[in-house]
Amino acid sequence: MNTDEKDRPIVLAFIHYYLPGYKSGGPIRTIANMVEALGDSFDFRIVTSDRDATDTEPYPDVTDGVWKTVGKAQVLYLSPQEKSLGHIARVLRDTQHDVLYLNSFFDPDFTQKPLLARRLGLAPRTHCVIAPRGEFSESALRLKPLKKRAYMLAARVMQLYRGLKWQASSEHEEADIRRTLGSVAKRIKIAINLPETVINEPPLFVPSEQGEPLRICFLSRISPMKNLDFALKVLGEVRAPVRFDIYGPVSDEGYWLHCRKLMEDLPANVETAWFGGVEHEHVTSILAGYHLFFLPTQGENYGHVIHEALAAGTPVLIADTTPWRNLADACVGWDLPLGDPQKFAEKIEYIARMTADEDSRMRASSVSFARKRIVDAGSLEANMDLFRKI
């Protein structure tokens, strides 16, 4: 629906990283896609960092503390000095809004401080929606568990989360929220993360010459959650010639050193290379150049890069820890249990044996499957109801 400018409800969203950033992956795409899809009906004001993940310098074309038009949203970029409780409380007071939208549970600056400001009476207690973005999955909670349990206990004692509305991106995430928070999370709305609204024709795929290695791609943040070390261990069991290219920023240096050691120990039939982070506009063209996208992630709230791989015509090999399930039935790849790494190696060998015709059919099926997953009226309505029916 289109709404007159003056009648649009104002959604004030806090997210640690936003455009033009790209290194934190899915959360940026989630909010950018939501703004594109709903920006004619809601007035989005986004508060975020003035630099990308792992960067020490701010974006060159933004001014800290000044609202900037980015697509259909107004964005306020904060310097590290502007992330104090007092300054965030001032932003909340000075920015008119109907709904506060928080895009994490554990983020100390962009979730904990806004909620604390409200609890202490330093900011207005408007309606509030919080999206944990997969932080309550069992695999996510296993990372830094003591710190997370301590914060959840403190937040419960201070009643920071009482009366909020929660967004789950799937039934699985709804169950994760209820299991973790119990009666604190009384109001949960399932609203799937919105994918890109348009899928362009993918670049032409150039098949390998006879004797050339199978081209496999990993594209995600390099962190324990994304499970690159598992992928490398699987490739150590593959006998077909493979070229494994890794794209993504390093968010955990110790983990990356561990992965580098695994790369050095791979057999001679597996070549590897790392190319760092990729800006979003280049993702499709990169993914389209590979026979297979391999992401054995320990968990995904949505998995935008999985949709992007399929839209590029590249079959996917992923874990059964995402909303992307039953891929083999659609002839677009596989979602397998992490407890059976040999199954992953078998699927890589299968792809390596495929004929050119089989490869073409699988690529065509992948594009068709991705196009069917483009946002439909039901998912749009569910996302609008997050703010419209609060």
Image (tube, helix red, strand yellow):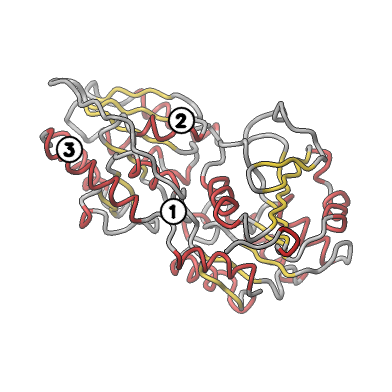
**Circle 1: element type:** loop
**Circle 3: element type:** helix
Quarter of the rendering occupied by the N terminus: bottom right
374 left or right, relative to 146:
left
The percent coordinates of residue 248 (x first, y second) are 48, 32
User: Where on the picture, by quarter, is residue 247?
Assistant: top left
The percent coordinates of residue 179 (x first, y second) are 52, 72
Q: Earlier in the sequence, mark 1 or mark 3?
A: 1
Amino acid at circle 3: Asp
202 left or right, relative to 74:
left
Tag on residue 278?
none
Question: Is the C-beta separation of discs 1 and 3 under 8 Å?
Answer: no
| Residue at numbered disc 2 | 282
Tag on residue 299?
1
Q: CA distance from mark 2 to mark 1?
A: 24 Å
> Which label sits in the foreground, 2 or 1?
2
Q: CA distance from mark 1 to mark 3?
A: 28 Å
Question: Which residue is at a point 39% across and 37% down the rendered structure image?
Answer: 229
The crowd level at tag 2 (other Cα within 10 Å; few <14, some 14-19, many 20+) is few
| Residue at numbered disc 3 | 359
Question: Is the C-beta separation of discs 3 and 2 under 8 Å?
Answer: no
Amino acid at circle 2: His
> Which label sits in the foreground, 1 or 3?
3
Question: Which residue is at a point 64% across and 59% down the rendered structure image?
Answer: 105
Amino acid at circle 1: Gly
